[in-house]
Image (tube, helix red, strand yellow):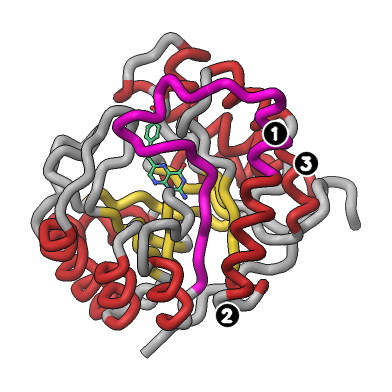
Amino acid sequence: MIRRFSCPDWPRPGSAESPLIMGILNATPDSFYDGGRFNSVERAVEAAAAMLDAGADIIDVGGESTRPGAEPISPEEELDRVIPVIEALAERFDCPLSVDTSTPAVITLAVEKGACLVNDVRALTRPGALEAAAASGASVCVMHMRGEPGDMAGRTDYADVVEEVVSYLAGRIEELMQAGIPADRILVDPGFGFAKTGEQNFVLLRRLEALACLKTPLLVGMSRKRMVGEATGRPLEERAVGSAAAALLAAERGARVLRVHDVAATRDALSVWQAMRRAGES
Ligand code: PT1
């Protein structure tokens, strides 16, 4: 059974529409924050339940770390980590499930087991990934990055980071559509923290509205990332407030899906924004 995931049209900044909150569920023993606390299926279900309680709209399950410097894992290892979790979540909850993967076999099986969104930081560029995603019938999110998480850190020479991200994503949208993925099943992501300097990340955030020209819903992930650490001077475990602020700034600039660890903090930030936008309307 495929539960379709679709996003409403790109809202104009200031429209009453609130973005969706995507809760991050790491099915990784080396997860960059939870230290592998949720690497058993049971713990994953608990973590998802807590995020849904706190107001998450979508759960994103990933088995491979993509933080700077991370090394890829084998398809077998990734399948072992991700598929049992997707299965358990699909059985327990009826929220949309997303799978954070670049691996064709994981795409195919995860969608078969209940995922309705394929979230790929490599933008379906691995051999067979585009075909697997198209054949699955799921929605897809394609992200901008250069190189691989293991070697992306130094690759930050952009003439104009916003222009390059827009033109890269425009090219991916073209290819996706040629492969048979309809436009209304495509989301894009500028890839905060992927082959960008701290300054470039904030230029992208400031000028996020430039991505509206792509006419696809925008997903963003800044949660607990180094850019938030640099701005606040805080270590990983103290970045929830800064992350909620970053998510809110992205929402105001048209982001449709916010990929976050701290669901409750993000929900509160959005509620305050919504209250302001509704004030004086009637
Ligand atoms: C993201 C994202 C993702 N980020 C999408 N999927 C990660 N669509 C995983 C740092 O600078 O932004 N969008 N899946 C996590 N990757 C990172 C990258 C974690 C950078 C941390 C950093 O600290």
Please determine whether, in this image, residue 8 is positioned above or below residue 213.
Answer: below
Q: How many marks?
A: 3
User: Is residue 67 at all visible to an observer of this figure?
Assistant: yes
Q: Residue at x 70, y 46 (%)?
A: 167
Task: Locate residue 255, reporting x and y percent.
Answer: 65, 48
Q: 1 left or right of 251? A: left
Residue farthest to the top?
Answer: 233
Q: Secondary structure at mark 1?
A: helix
Distance (Cα) linking label 1 and label 2: 27 Å
Task: Locate residue 176, reporting x and y percent.
Answer: 57, 68
Q: Which mark is drawn over residue 162?
A: 1
Q: Quadrant of the C terminus?
A: bottom right
In the picture of the structure, the residue carrying the numbered disc 3 is: 210
Distance (Cα) linking label 3 and label 2: 26 Å
Look at the image and give the residue range highlighted in magenta.
Answer: 139-166
Distance (Cα) linking label 3 and label 1: 8 Å
Task: Locate residue 172, reporting x and y percent.
Answer: 59, 58
Query: Pointer 3 and pointer 1: residues touching (CB < 8 Å)?
Result: yes
Q: Residue at x 26, y 68 (%)?
A: 106
Q: Nearer the viewer, mark 3 or mark 2?
A: 2
Please determine whether, in this image, residue 281 is positioned above or below residue 253.
Answer: below
Q: Quadrant of the N terminus?
A: bottom left
Q: Nearer the viewer, mark 1 or mark 2?
A: 2
Foreground residue, 132 or 66? Answer: 132
Q: Secondary structure at mark 2?
A: loop
Magenta stretch mostly in which secondary structure?
Answer: loop
Please determine whether, in this image, residue 111 is positioned above or below residue 189.
Answer: below
Q: Which mark is drawn over residue 180?
A: 2
Looking at the rendering, the quadrant in which ligand 1 lies is top left
Question: Is-magenta flag for residue 275?
Answer: no
Choose the circle earlier in sequence order: 3 or 2.
Answer: 2
